[in-house]
């Protein structure tokens, strides 16, 4: 004999949780990044290959939203020199950032949304910052030439940026010809 059980939907309004046609509990298993992408709130910032000076920031993404938090999921980096890559958190309020403007690309191509962020590649007015992660890049040599593999740094949605907070990627040694990087994140209500 079956006994019915009432399960609340978790919103606090007293409604029952939803079930499918087979009376199985509906459970969302998509990642937070996937869910944000469905809403058009997930973005990628990509810094194309550039000759970065040792004092410049390879890619800086600053949240300009006063009402939404920017959650950073991961970053990809690749350069043509072995050496140290620092990831930093910075405060950008009142600063005039410079460099090559980078537009955040909405990861849901069916929606036309603009990220509430300022982003620059080869950023020359890099703000004072706190280094929170360092990666040491090595080089690989093959028949095609010498390069470093693309490395993904997975922050597991652990970096949260409020208004005027930024994440930046710095290379300590100057790349010979180029350095590329991407930052992927999504917005949530603050």
Image (cartoon, rainbow, N blue to C red):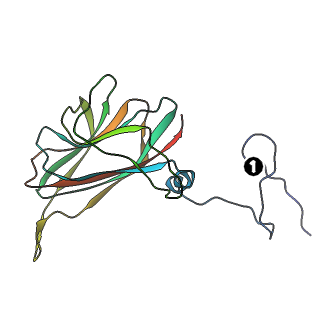
Q: How many marks?
A: 1
Does residue 71 appear in the picture of this structure? Answer: yes
Residue carrying label 1: 9
- Which residue: 12% across, 50% down? 51
Which residue is found at the position 32% from the left and 22% from the top? 94
Q: Nearer the viewer, residue 2 or 7?
A: 7
**Side of 85 relative to 73 (left or right):** left
| The C terminus: image quadrant | top right
View extreme (right): residue: 1
* Residue density around tag 1, few if under 14, some if 14–19, many if 20 or more, within 10 Å: few
Looking at the image, residue 32 lies above or below residue 129: below
Q: Residue furthest left?
A: 176
Q: Height in image: 27 above or below 15? A: below
**Residue 189, quarter of the rendered image:** top right
Residue 17 horizontal/vertical position (percent): 77, 53
For this orientation, the residue located farthest to the top is: 94
* Residue located 40% across and 38% down the image: 117
Residue at the bottom extreme? 143
Q: Quadrant of the N terminus?
A: bottom right
Residue 33 coordinates in the image, percent (x, y): 49, 53
Residue 146 locus on image (x, y percent):
10, 67
Out of 112 and 131, give the one closest to the viewer.
112
Left or right of 131? Residue 185 is: right
Say which residue appears at 52% left-offset and 31% top-offset. Answer: 67
Return the x and y of residue 60 as percentages of the image width and height.
29, 40
Residue 61 visible in this rendered orientation of the protein:
no
User: Dot 1 lies on which element?
Assistant: loop
């Amino acid at each position: 004999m079956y006994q019915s059980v009432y399960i609340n939907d978790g919103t606090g309004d007293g409604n029952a949780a939803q079930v499918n046609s087979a009376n199985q509990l509906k459970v969302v298993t998509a990642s937070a990044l996937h869910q944000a992408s469905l809403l058009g709130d997930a973005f990628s910032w990509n810094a194309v290959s550039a000759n970065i000076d040792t004092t410049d920031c390879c890619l800086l993404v600053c949240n300009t939203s006063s009402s939404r938090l920017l959650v950073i999921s991961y970053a990809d980096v690749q350069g043509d020199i072995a050496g140290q890559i620092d990831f930093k958190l910075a405060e950008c309020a009142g600063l005039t950032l410079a460099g090559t403007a980078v537009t955040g690309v909405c990861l849901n191509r069916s929606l036309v949304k603009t990220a509430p962020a300022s982003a620059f590649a080869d950023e020359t007015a890099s703000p004072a910052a706190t280094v929170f992660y360092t990666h040491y890049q090595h080089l690989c040599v093959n028949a095609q030439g010498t390069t470093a593999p693309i490395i993904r740094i997975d922050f597991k949605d652990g970096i949260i940026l409020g208004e005027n907070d930024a994440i930046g990627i710095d290379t300590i040694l100057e790349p010979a010809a180029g350095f590329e990087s991407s930052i992927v994140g999504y917005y949530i209500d603050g």
